[in-house]
Amino acid sequence: MNLLDLLDYVEKNPKDYEKRWTLAKKLYQNKDYSLALDHLTVLVNEWEPHINVYRFLSATLYRLGKYEDAIEKLKKAIEIWGNEPGLYEQLGRIYVTIGKYDLAKQTYEKLHEICPEHKWAHVAIERLKRHIERKTVKKRPFPVILATDFDLLPESICKRCGSENPKDNDHCWKCGETLRLSTSPPNLSTTGFSQNVLINLTPEIITLFLGLVLIIFVSINIFMSLTFWLQKPTLLHTHLSFWDIYQNELLLSRIITGFSLLIISPLLINLISKIMGVKESIHPNLIILVGILIASIVFLFSWLPKFIILWGFAFIPLFAFLIILGTFGISLLKALNICLLYILSLLISTILLLTLSESYQLKRFINPISQIPSTVSFFRTQYPNSTRSLEIKSEDGSPVIRNILWNSTGSYWLDTRSKEITITLFLNDADEFVLEVNRGETKPIIYEKLRSERYKVNLPIETDTNYTIKISTSNNTPFVAIVQSLFTSNLS
């Protein structure tokens, strides 16, 4: 019977404690400790006393970071089964985990008393004595210890299928999984558990690693912000694509948004963890480091080149999920749910911060609900088919007068950010020319009279307004004027 079938069966048959016990073991093995705790609590309160139920209950409370509750359950079990070595093993290891070394030594001494042939109780006692004599103070470890050889599971319970086995069995009768525990003594120099040599995740190592990565990412973001800001063009610039606007016009808003996300991101993760009802004890410093780290990755990706920036942002959910799953020590499903809600919240926060920054700079409220769709619509439908450049030509050099109307993009934010046009004048030969641009017929924006073979100028314009362009040469030299802008236009 698979896990889902067991859940359904137990819900319909709450008094079938044997099946509930099987379900609790499978939930523990799947690291769904919160749900396992619910079923184990029912078994302890309603079922006949079973030592393995108490051991699983204590192990589950330990995995949730509820050390005092785990100790209480083990003490209650010891009152019933006072000569069971496994209970003292668990209790001693938990005492070491929370730094109560005196109590841990007393527990291992009791273990050695009831089981003199125990494989490593005497070693634990000697190490604890030396440790206490040195008065070495160890910081409390993070609640979740990865890659531990000793998983607080009774040796008669199969870790793979959860089947009961006689204590003399070396392998599970059902699936063949080995049942022998590690014979090595606990490593009391760190957290009190024998850990895999490849992964020794102490608080110092986790904090140091995340801190170093964080410093690197934040430093790169500061460097990129200063570099792009110093390279920002000081003169008027004509934007012919959204990428031009993103690089130049949105630079300040992007910097403000990026650094603001570094502050908001940890708050979002903490809030979402509470909303999702995560019962595992997650250290606040870990939440802060993870939140800033993910936000710094988002900020860093905003500096990517045009051809890979979308791919970079597409991978952010994956990076966020892996970071949350790898550091918080929660189940896969919880990490996925937290990640999805966090990414959605981060996206909304980014949009709000960008629009607030733009509203402040432009002295006008930018409504993201209306402006984002209209901007996207322009670049998806109108912009690919629009005329980005107009040609005003005189083959015989005679004066030319043209009336131009630049149409709105449909977004007042985009109209404001893209209000410049570029006029480039090419003459067949160097000659004196006059270039005049008027708003309407009589309000001049520019009047330029000089001698040259080529001339270029950027001008601010307003959409849905008529403009008049006048060009003439002193010696009737043929010329061509190219007018470039983001807007569609009508020429007459």
Image (spheres, helix red, strand yellow):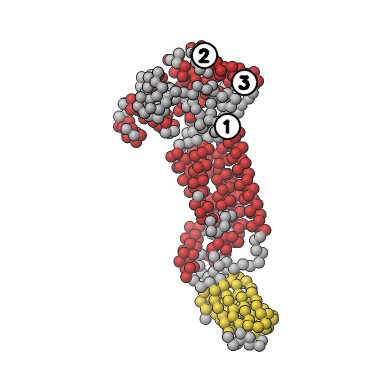
Residue 489's spot in the image, x, y percent? Answer: 52, 74
Q: In this rendering, would 233 be left or right of 11?
A: right
Where disc 2 sits, the SS reads helix
C-alpha distance separating marks 3 and 1: 18 Å
Residue placed furthest toward the right:
451
Binning the other alpha carbons within 10 Å of mark 2 as few (below 14), some (14 to 19) or many (20 upward) gives many
The foreground one among 23 and 159 is 159
Q: Is residue 110 left or right of residue 217?
A: left
Above or below: residue 2 compared with residue 304:
above
Amino acid at circle 1: Thr
Dot 3 or dot 1: first in sequence order is: 3
Which callout, 1 or 2, points at the residue further toward the start of the chain?
Answer: 2
Q: Give me the disc on residue 202.
A: 1
Please, is residue 443 above or below residue 105 in the view? Answer: below
Position in image of residue 384 (x %, y %) = 48, 68
x 44%, y 25%: residue = 153
Q: Quadrant of residue 434?
A: bottom right
Instruction: Report how far apart the C-alphas of labels 3 and 2 lie in the structure.
Output: 19 Å
Q: Amino acid at mark 2?
A: His
Q: Position of residue 311 (x, y in %)?
A: 51, 54
Badge 1: residue crowd in 10 Å (few <14, some 14–19, many ≥20) = some
Residue at 46% in and 21% down: 73
Whether residue 50 is visible to the viewer of this picture, yes or no, is no
